[in-house]
Image (cartoon, coloured by chain):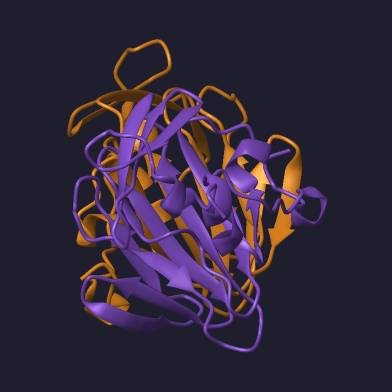
Chain colours: A purple, B orange
Amino acid sequence: MPKLDLSRIEARGGSGYPGRLAAAMAGRTGQRLGDAGGLTQFGANLIHLAPGAMSSLRHYHMEQDEFVMVTAGVCTLIDDQGAHEMLPGDCAAFPAGDANGHHLVNRSDAPAAFLVVGTRTETDTAFYSDMDMKVTVTGRTFDFTRKDGSPLTADQTGENS
Amino acid sequence: MPKLDLSRIEARGGSGYPGRLAAAMAGRTGQRLGDAGGLTQFGANLIHLAPGAMSSLRHYHMEQDEFVMVTAGVCTLIDDQGAHEMLPGDCAAFPAGDANGHHLVNRSDAPAAFLVVGTRTETDTAFYSDMDMKVTVTGRTFDFTRKDGSPLTADQTGENS
């Protein structure tokens, strides 16, 4: 049945970020709509942001196009040019390789949500704009390092605290 | 600027269907949001359906995943299982190669709209469920034939009338 029953698709929290960086994802959950419908070529996820939550650490992808549409509440898009308020129906596009790091933040006092679509590729690299970190993706393996490929420091991951 | 100004993205009508089949697309326009934002890996189009209009002739894709989310009004998804009403926020997914032809029809008396995302592939074949027609896509070339590859008949395209 192509029509999806969103009430039956789990909203998952958590984060794959290393160490204390994962804490930044509190208040964010995601429903993998495309996966639930059997899609493999791109992800189509409905992301729910509690007040104060963010979509991800600010980043850009080298190999994967990304598209978002706000579906509920008010999201603030943060990119290299500043902050841009987005209401339901507002859209943004992030071409692969465009070095303009971005994320969505819920600065309001009500829940917000958006649909995000991203290409699935066998490999990818994403760079984080506000810290010395990148992630190198191969299949299902996510390798977080500094931008020069060296290990993250204990200061970055909080493992020394 | 990643955030898109939808008021500046043209809503295009018309159809690539041959002959009289193009008339079925009356009342449908589309805004190519992903293209406007520089995306190339998938299309992300906002489709507007006047009362009585349809998204396309009912079909399925062999190589391209497809995802829709209704954004305004009421759409009716028609597939092999029948008619399914879809309201804003409702989603459907159509995996490549799943031989369940589908389209959205606006059976209401008010405008409706939906976001549709489809993978961009170099080649594709789509089969039409309610007539003896397929389209073979290579790059930007769309070759409409009968399902066995022979030319469409004059009865099909209306060229004998």
- Asked if residue A46 is positioned above or below residue B109 in the image, the reply reads above
Give the residue at x 64% y 64%: A26
Q: For the view shown, which residue lies furthest in the front direction?
A: A160
Percent across and percent down for residue B109 are 61, 78
Q: Position of residue B69 (x, y in %)?
A: 56, 58
In the image, residue A74 sits, relative to residue B61, either above or below, namely below
Residue B22: x and y, percent? Answer: 33, 49
Give the answer, above or below, for where A138 lies relative to B47.
above
What is the quadrant of the C terminus of chain A in the image? bottom right
Relative side of B37 to A151, left or right: left
Q: Nearer the viewer, residue A127 or B76?
A: A127
> Picture quarter containing residue B12?
bottom left
- The answer to which image quadrant residue B80 occupies is top right
* Left or right: B134 in relation to A127: right
Residue located at (53% from left, 40% from top) = B58
Q: Residue furthest bottom?
A: A109
Residue sitting at x 31%, y 60%: A93
